[in-house]
Image (cartoon, rainbow, N blue to C red):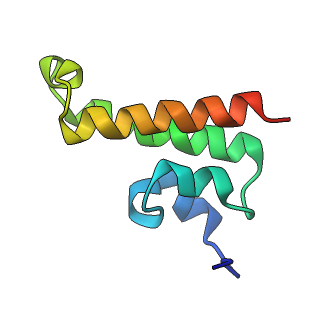
Amino acid sequence: MKRRSLDRTFAKRNPARVFGSPHEIVVEQLLTRGEKLGTLDRWRQSILDQLEPHEVERRGSGAALLLGQIEEARLRLSTSA
């Protein structure tokens, strides 16, 4: 379903509250490529800020899975023209 409006400022600052997954940012038509990359970076940093260093590396944790999805989304945006 196509989104008709988006509070771009809120979405860029609070991606976890607006988007269900990093993939949703990739396909969002109301953000530029640069905004998408910045939003993914912000989401990644917010996760890292909440974790202890040993938790980041723990495979299978929800945070590790989400971080992997964010990296995959960044790669998709970086390789698309």
Is residue 44 or residue 77 the one in the foreground? 77
Q: Position of residue 61 (x, y in %)?
A: 18, 35
Task: Name the spot of residue 54 as percent of width and height, x first.
Answer: 13, 17
List x then y, in percent, for residue 40.
Answer: 53, 41
State whether residue 63 is above or below residue 78.
Answer: below
- 72 up-or-down from 7: above or below: above
Q: Is residue 46 above or below residue 30?
A: above
Picture coordinates of residue 34 (x, y %)? 73, 40
Q: Residue at x 54, y 61 (%)?
A: 11
Q: Dividing the image into 4 quarters, which one contains the N terminus?
A: bottom right
**Of 15 and 57, which appears nearest the observer?**
57
Which residue is drawn at the image coordinates 54% and 51% (left, top)? 23
Front residue of this view, candidates 38 and 3:
3
**Could you tell whether 71 is left or right of 17 in the image?**
right
- Residue at the extreme front: 60
Q: Residue at x 66, y 56 (%)?
A: 27
| Snapshot quadrant of residue 39 | top right
| Rendered image quadrant of residue 30 | bottom right
Q: Quadrant of residue 24?
A: bottom right
